[in-house]
Image (cartoon, helix red, strand yellow):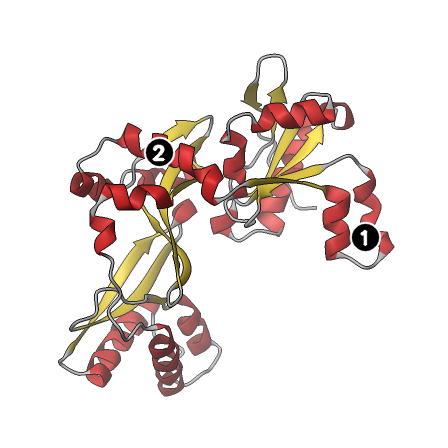
Amino acid sequence: MKDMSYKQFCERMKDILQQYYGVESNVKLHTVQKVNGVVLHGITVMKEGVSIVPTLYLESYYDELNRGMPLNDIVHRFILEYDKAAIHDDFDISFFEFYDKVKPHLGYKLINYEMNRELLQEVPHKRYLDLAIVCYCNIVDDRLGKGTILIRNEHLDIWKIEKDILIRDSLKNMPLIFPPEVINMADLLKELYDDPAQLICGKLPMYVLTTKARMYGAAAILYSGQLESIAKEVEDDFYLLPSSIHEIIILPKKYGTDEEYLSQMVDEINHEQLDIEEVLSNHAYLYSNLTKEVTSLPLIPYKKN
């Protein structure tokens, strides 16, 4: 089984699961375009009377196959995890048919423009510097838990609204569902480390801009008055170091004169510490308190030593 290609594995899993769940269910294999060029392959099991079903992606199961796990054990594990995730009572998603009901749950996130050209053909977006604003519906349910639904072009057709309206409402609503939070880096490090040796960089006047939920925090750079407030606090222009889509590191300009190194450090974090889907940008930015504008610093590719 180790010699089975990934494509063969996906088809084999689909056939076995269709046989297991029977003719009353429809097992489907999906290709899903994710952020930053990531393409995943997942399986759903559609059953009569159920309008929403989970998707389990097959990449991790294929890794288990290549590590020597028997196919029968993989199928058994998949079934256990899928049935645990499935919602057996029908979940009402009719609200998603009406924009007025979706509107209070709208948010947005920033993603890299160049890395997502293919995805951006499918979703309404607005460019910001070398990034893109994309919108989503925030879901919080006792059975579903927390999740998001990315807004796609076909949703605009259903709602009969223009892209600009969607983006306007998402920008307005985002601070309400995900309020901003600016954390002193020293305080954050104290939360993460008990060893005082780990707190050396805490001596620098650095901050982390994120959201209180610590989710899609890079979006907070577009919150009205947010960057102006930070500039007033630090009494200086400042660099923005995108450490992921979830947070931005703030460094006052007077403490970061080597701009090439800052951009290289951002690229290093992307390569060494982040999953590809969490990467936002591969360089730093500079906010000017005089012009109230953010500009991009040159890209300095990271070279592994």
Query: How many residues crowd around disc 2 within 10 Å: few (fewer than 14), some, or many (20 or more)?
Result: some
Q: Residue 209: which quarter of the image?
A: top right
**Of label 2 and label 1, which has the lower sequence position?**
2
User: Is residue 229 depicted above or below 54 in this figure?
Assistant: above
In this view, the residue in front, 49 or 297, is 49
Query: How many residues crowd around disc 1 within 10 Å: few (fewer than 14), some, or many (20 or more)?
Result: few
Q: Residue at x 31, y 72 (%)?
A: 87
Q: Is residue 41 left or right of residue 198?
A: left
Question: Residue 169, which numbered label?
Answer: 2
Of all residues, the one furthest to the top in this rendering is 290
**One can see residue 112 in this view:** yes
Amino acid bearing label 1: Gln
Quick one: quadrant of the N terminus? bottom left
Relative image position of residue 106 (x, y in whole percent): 36, 42
Which one is closest to the eye, mark 2 or mark 1? Answer: 2
Q: Is residue 283 left or right of residue 116?
A: right
Q: Secondary structure at mark 1?
A: helix
Q: Residue at x 30, y 36 (%)?
A: 124
Relative image position of residue 242 (x, y in whole percent): 58, 38
**One can see residue 110 in this view:** no
User: Is residue 160 depicted above or below 53 in this figure?
Assistant: above
Amino acid bearing label 2: Asp
**What residue does disc 1 label?**
198
Distance (Cα) linking label 2 and label 1:
42 Å
Q: Residue at x 51, y 40 (%)?
A: 280
Relative image position of residue 205 (x, y in whole percent): 77, 34
Total marks placed: 2
